[in-house]
Amino acid sequence: GAVVSQHPSWVICKSGTSVKIECRSLDFQATTMFWYRQFPKQSLMLMATSNEGSKATYEQGVEKDKFLINHASLTLSTLTVTSAHPEDSSFYICSASPQGLGTDTQYFGPGTRLTVL
Amino acid sequence: RKEVEQDPGPFNVPEGATVAFNCTYSNSASQSFFWYRQDCRKEPKLLMSVYSSGNEDGRFTAQLNRASQYISLLIRDSKLSDSATYLCTFSGSARQLTFGSGTQLTVLP
């Protein structure tokens, strides 16, 4: 149980294009999902907290107009990197915590490796 | 001071060795603590939660010391498959996780 999927697993795009990444909880519902980014040899950095039915909460330094988050249902959150540039190339990972279990345990998706040319 | 600090390593140990990692945190309001392992180019996977009373799962033992604000992970009888980066993390009131930079472990044959 507690499986989180991400799609696509990798994407290569040209500079200036937008890329949408989907994060799905497959066997549980999650009112909150989290989006992280990891650059090579660095740790995961929280970008934003995605809340079902309301606006996402962004961490300091993360541009909300560049990284659009939509959490339309209890099992799906999307992250859109708008007008991507080479410096946005990174490993994007989402996580979700099963609601109602009284636990903070988070389960991670397999990640999406974005390369912007 | 960073919120979470870990010795990045690398730790290179022979098979069968016992190895310990420590992780310090600065936010005394941190609520829950975890160790994750991350293999190269993969997502983190939960290894174990960390409780004040200490908890053990097979060859792995985790401890939390709230007074000194650190958590530890002990791996006994290390296997080649234990080679990975070990991330300590804690969650705050909003349940988001703050990760350390990770400790790289390589178990050598």
Image (tube, rainbow, N blue to C red):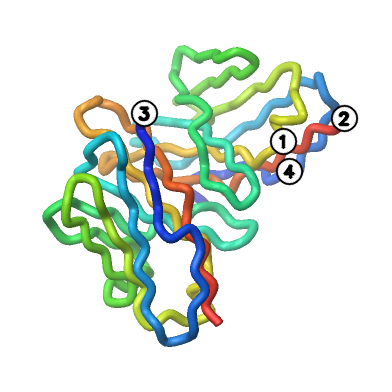
Say whether mark 2 and mark 4 are on the same chain: yes
Report crowding for label 3: few under 14, some 14 to 19, many 20 or more residues within 10 A (C-alpha).
few
Report crowding for label 2: few under 14, some 14 to 19, many 20 or more residues within 10 A (C-alpha).
few
Image mark for residue B109: 2
Q: Nearer the viewer, mark 3 or mark 1?
A: 3
Question: Does residue A116 show up?
Answer: yes
Say whether mark 2 and mark 1 are on the same chain: yes
Q: Is residue A26 left or right of residue B87?
A: left
| Residue drawn at (68%, 46%) of the image | B8
Q: CA distance from mark 3 to mark 2?
A: 34 Å
Location of mark 3 (residue): A1
Of mark 4 and mark 2, the one earlier in the sequence is 4
Of mark 1 and mark 4, the one earlier in the sequence is 4
- Kindly check if marks 3 and 4 are in contact, taking CB atoms under 8 A apart as contact: no
Q: Chain of mark 3?
A: A
- Kindly check if marks 3 and 1 are in contact, taking CB atoms under 8 A apart as contact: no
Location of mark 4 (residue): B9
Residue type at mark 4? Gly
Report crowding for label 4: few under 14, some 14 to 19, many 20 or more residues within 10 A (C-alpha).
few
Of mark 1 and mark 2, the one earlier in the sequence is 1
Location of mark 1 (residue): B83
| Residue drawn at (32%, 42%) of the image | A96
Residue in front for this viewpoint, A25 or B64: A25
Question: Does residue B1 show up?
Answer: no
> SS class of the residue under badge 2?
loop
